[in-house]
Each structure stands twice: as C-alpha cells, then as structure tokens.
Amino acid sequence: MIGRSACVSACAGANRSRGRWVGWLALLALMAATGLTAQGDGASPVDIDEVMCALCHFEQGDEFVTSIHYQKGLLLCDDCHGGDPFAVQLETAKAPETGFIGKPRREDIAAICGRCHTGPARFFAQGPHRDWENDDNPTCITCHHNHRVFDATLALMEESCVRCHVSDSEPASGGVAIRSRLEGSAAHLARVAMDLDRLRVIDPKLDRVVPMLKAARSTLREADPITHALNLELIEETLEAVGSELAVVEERLVESVQDRQRRRWAVLGVWLFVAVNVFFLWAKRRQLD
C-alpha cells in the first residue's frame, strides 16, 4: 500500500515554485513568533534626533536605532526607563511625575519586559533562571540585550546557552534539544503547507483545509514563549498538538489524492467499456458484411 507521504508527493508535482515560497513562509512565521511577542502593531519610528535622551546617551541611542523595538516603532526610552524623552530640560525630562527610574534594577528587568512580553515572562518565572538574586542566572537582557534588541530566532537559544554553559553540558544540550524539536515541527508544517498548496491547484475543495493548517501554525506559535521555561516536556505537549493537527491535514490530502486516483480508474473503466463495445460492434459488422 502506498505511504502517505509518497502518495501525496507522487501526485503533487504541479506548481512547485508556488509551493516552495509557501513553505518558506511557514518557517519565517516560526522565526517571527519565536522573536518579538510584544502586543500592538507598532508604528513608524520617531526620528532619533528628536529623542533628547540620545543627545547624551548617544552610544545607547546608536544601538537602539538598530533594534526591532525602534525600527517597528514599538517603544522608546520612557517605556523602560520612564521620563520624558522629548523634554529639552534635564529637570523636566527626569521629573518625578514622568515616572523616571533610570537604569532598571536587576530584580525589575523581567517585570518591565513582561509588560509587553507577557507569555515569555510568565514561563521565564517557571524556569531555572528565575532567581534574580543568583548572580549566575541571566536576565532578559543577558540573551536579548537591552538597547540592541534584534528579532530573535531559534539560533539565539544555542548562541546564548553556550555563553554560560559548556557546549556538552546538560543545560546546553537541553537548549539544543528544544531548538531541534521546534525546528522539526516547523519543517513538518512547511512540508504539509507545500503539499497543500500544490494540491489545491487541482482540487479546489482543499481550500476548506486551509483553516486547519492555520490552526496548526497558531498552535506552533504557542510553543515559543514556553521556551523561556527551558522545559522540553512543556513544549512537547504543544508540539504534540501541532502534530495531531497536521495529521488531520495530511489525511485530507491523502483522501484527495486517493479520490482522484479512483476517478481516474473509473474514467479508464468507462473508456475501456466503450472500446470493447466498439470493437464488438465493428467485429459484428464485418461478420454481417
């Protein structure tokens, strides 16, 4: 009996280029979800020259303009430090009514980041690094930086772990295992998305399966904040749900392929029946002649 993957792939040769970019979109979606999870759509960034903080703190300003926080217009200095970033007078910029706190204390960093990144903060509080009083434990800015915050990817996990942990140690290996499982699920989703996109060209009824694929992609995004707990068992629960949702999509694809194959055999049978009857009519006519 033909396997599920072979069955789908054998009949999904059309429109490969379109399927390829859909697969890449699935991977990019995981990368985006793994990175910034702040709420809000953002806006055009403010001209950094209008931010008075950067006139004195120019090094921090130069770093900040390269960050995803600035480039997507998500926040400014006052969102983390308080104060009025547009006030020209120092006394006005740091007045008590502006909520100025200056450099956040180590114990406050997770709470400040958690104002927007609620999911990561919640799971970070469950992880092995949650004790801020332990100077050996990292905070958010240890891995993500403070002013130069880039769009996080799964590669960041491995890069960050080995700063403190030996590469073959249990903590570092755990980070590699988490990354590997997430990448595996993302690749699985990408393959299913490619097959679905190819088969939809010849079977429009598969459009109804698209919401199922979107649901699986959404479930996969739910695993990203959980990485901050560094608990593979917690992540596995979500990835198993992703696998189950993708299995349903794959079943629909296989059903589509098999249904098309049955129709082909049915058409072939009709033509064979017609050909046999034509032959017999021709043979009968020759006998009569």
Image: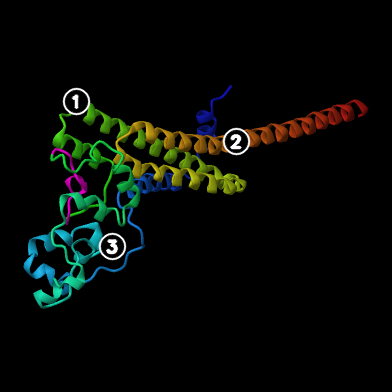
What is the magenta range?
A: 136-147
Are the residues at dot 1 and dot 2 in contact (C-beta closer than 8 Å)?
no
Q: Residue 47 or 129: which is nearer the viewer? A: 129
Percent x, y for residue 111? 26, 53
Magenta stretch: includes residue 140: yes
Secondary structure at numbered mark 3: loop
Residue 150 in view in this figure:
yes
Q: Measure the C-alpha gap from mark 1 to mark 2.
A: 45 Å
Tell me, for residue 168, which label it has, or none: 1
Q: Is residue 16 left or right of residue 272?
A: left
Task: Establish if 96 lies above or below 244.
Answer: below
Quarter of the image with the C terminus in it = top right
User: In the figure, is residue 264 to the left or right of 127?
Assistant: right
Query: Picture coordinates of residue 197 (x, y %)?
Result: 50, 45
Q: Which mark, residue 257?
A: 2
Which tag is nearer the camera, tag 2 or tag 3?
A: 3
Identify which amino acid the numbered label 3 is placed on. Answer: Lys
Upstream in sequence: badge 2 or badge 3: 3
Residue drawn where x is 69% and y is 36% of the image: 263
26 magenta-colored: no
Work out how far the residue at label 2 is from the one at label 3, CA to CA, in angstroms. 43 Å
Crowd band around label 1 with a 10 angstrom C-alpha radius: few (<14), some (14–19), many (20+): few
* Image location (x, y in percent) of residue 125: 29, 43
* Residue type indicated by callout 2: Val
Q: Which residue lies at the image location 19% right of the left edge and 45% below the top edge?
A: 139
Among the two numbered marks 3 and 1 on one chain, the one whose residue lies closer to the N terminus: 3
Q: Reply above or below: 80 against 141.
A: below
